[in-house]
Amino acid sequence: MTRTMSTLNTDLKERIGKANAEVVRRLVDARPFLIDMAPAKDVVPGLGGGRRRVHHSGPPIELARMCGAQKGAIVCAALAEGWAQTPAEAFQLLEAGDIELGCNHEHQSVGPMAGIVSPNTWVYVVENRTANNVSFAPEQQARATFGAYDDAIAVQERRTSSGIIGPTLRKALKHTGPLDLGELMAQSLHMGDELHNRVTAASCLLLRALLPGLVKVGGAEVLKTIEYINEQSVFFLAVSMAAAKSMSDAAADVPESTLVTTMCRNGTDFGIRIAGLKGRWFCGPAQKVRGPYMPGFGDDDAGLDMGDSAVTEVIGVGGCAMSAAPAISSFVGGTAKDLLDSVPKMRQICTGRNPKFTIPILDFEPTPVGIDIRKVVKTGILPIINTAIAHKDAGHQILGAGIVHPPLSCFADALRAFGAHYLPPRS
Amino acid sequence: MTRTMSTLNTDLKERIGKANAEVVRRLVDARPFLIDMAPAKDVVPGLGGGRRRVHHSGPPIELARMCGAQKGAIVCAALAEGWAQTPAEAFQLLEAGDIELGCNHEHQSVGPMAGIVSPNTWVYVVENRTANNVSFAPEQQARATFGAYDDAIAVQERRTSSGIIGPTLRKALKHTGPLDLGELMAQSLHMGDELHNRVTAASCLLLRALLPGLVKVGGAEVLKTIEYINEQSVFFLAVSMAAAKSMSDAAADVPESTLVTTMCRNGTDFGIRIAGLKGRWFCGPAQKVRGPYMPGFGDDDAGLDMGDSAVTEVIGVGGCAMSAAPAISSFVGGTAKDLLDSVPKMRQICTGRNPKFTIPILDFEPTPVGIDIRKVVKTGILPIINTAIAHKDAGHQILGAGIVHPPLSCFADALRAFGAHYLPPRS
């Protein structure tokens, strides 16, 4: 019996190897293009038809367990949508269950931090031209995304995004045509970005690519759009995430693969999904982010890890490409040596390499890609995730930024479930 | 007598130390702003009044010793200016001495590679707002600057630069107002540039800064300008050089200083000047550049080191900031380790540090600045200069890029002259 079991295991190991290679191939071969911007209600599954509904970041969560920042961001969206006139009214609607909830990742979407997408949120539309799937991410609103909901600033920001920024960028994109994000992302890794917390170069490159379109559109709304974009430090983040979602969704269903295709957090839970167990969530507690705070804030104020942005780590950038972005240490803490060491560390839990994404300071070594739950469990090395810090309560802006890890239990649970699914029951 | 001599030396050493600190202070305190673009004839000393005259890169040189690429670039300028109708006519004018020659560095100017500035060349106008001096550098024409002079491309390129690009950028700058180049350069060092051979990020940042102005100007000429800029890999190079010239000119006359304030090459001679011996040139043979060639070219085709761009190394970027730009190894050769080692090496021959220019991968250490001829002679360590390679003959485009050093003799000669000037004759 032991021999048979072992043969079966060897056979499964080989099949896992093949399945994992297929996942890596799909991630590496993906060709994400920014093709449009649109109101979520027109494109995101579930948000059309005049429903009072929002999607949030992270794995699915019931209202009772939802963190303060996500609630604040929903209140902000409710005000911007006109579902409520005051924050108190909006909180009431939410608590009464009169706002439907869904999770971005189950609707072809990803959103930074609270990640709240409501019907009139404008989203980037990214097409993976290899697998022909489409993904969405909301145009980033710096304040609302952290759970702020004051009328004068956060709500106005959402309205400006929907009323001016989204439509203007859409017009510009009509002139430029689809933009090759893979190429742009590869270039930005040579310009000090890691494409999650640091997207300074990618933001410039995207703006440059949009430039002829913006000039052709012309006028006051274009000037307002440029001003708005230049005020944001992370213009490209949502685009990077939509691209990563389009890449990882193409690999979301590969039976017998042990590779991670989703990592996300809602400020309460951290959730992962793997290619071999399509659609199943393995959740554990969202962790505390380690990193410097803005002046006046500290550990007691901070919420837990939140946002869909860890989709960037899934495709081999962000924490898997940190060595490319030495300037990020001023934002997330640590030394240049920590950054140089981080990519070799991530190689130990990744199956493949992405030859399209290379890191100059490591002599153009490709970034590691394809986090294997087996390797995580075996080595105890956890994926490095670059992230920002939100407040634990509703109504605040960004508090800081830093490094965070998933809980090991997600990977252990997923591995156990994988075994239960693919290994015959022991007699 | 020996005691007296020694006392004198100690005293001079102290005075040199003070003078050198003053040079470093002027370099570090400089605040270069891009304030305008203009035709050279309107702003560059010597090029007005309808004269048939050009300025070239490097130290002054007589026609008989001038390299092929500079002659080719002058022929191109003569055709673009309408001084001649054919290359043969232009060569005839030049060889007959009917085109006056001057050197950029003696006319508040610097130019990349051949560096030919003719009356109708449009130049960037950079003001150092600390010392209130102004410097110029020609809008870069990718082909002509390497000595190409074919009508259809190189001459047309000069005419497009003068007819469309320069005037359009001038209009955009009128809208944006003066742009702070120091800040922009500091930022680009955090984005993988070293500001000489690699200006990818700085080019994006400058374009972004110009963007509101370009949108306000609008129209076909703006679209043409954007296209032209995006085709250039080194849009910012001439701007970087003009900024560096404005910084180094402010330090060009500090008696008793042994610091280098000019390094430049004309494809025949390498010349330096030092702050303590204002205006005097110390020249040696221009060297062969070591680096990868474009396919189809090799050592036998290459001209010698050429251009005013080493002004960037004088102010502590370029070769003094190479560790900031790991991706440059794909252009100039070498490994990441070579690049990481290069800045510590340059520290050994530099007197100061520029706290405004920092290198993330070296834990934000400031770039070394202020090359001391004494340290160069004592250690034998030569400044690292990042550069491109032109053909030895007139009529060609870029051949490659690489690393080059000045000849040691320039520094030894300057030190000897310094001693002769400042030390009393031995009895």
Image (cartoon, coloured by chain):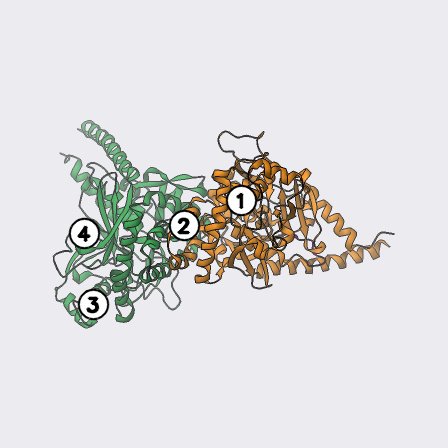
Chain colours: A orange, B green
Pinpoint the chain carrying mark 3.
B
Pinpoint the chain carrying mark 1.
A
The label nearer to you, 2 versus 1, is: 1
For numbered disc 2, what is the local secondary structure?
A: helix
Residue B112 in sight here? yes
* Quarter-of-image position of residue B156: bottom left
Residue named by callout 4:
B43
Distance of label 4 from label 1 (alpha carbons): 54 Å
| Labels 4 and 1 within one chain | no
Q: Could you tell me the amino acid type at mark 4?
A: Val
Question: Which is nearer the N-term, disc 2 or disc 1?
Answer: 1
Residue named by callout 3:
B79
* Residue drawn 23% across the image and 37% down it: B257
Distance of label 4 from label 2 (alpha carbons): 33 Å
Main SS category, magenta section: loop
Residue named by callout 1:
A80
Q: In x, y percent, where is residue A161? A: 48, 48
Residue A304 in sight here? no
Q: Could you tell me the amino acid type at mark 1?
A: Ala
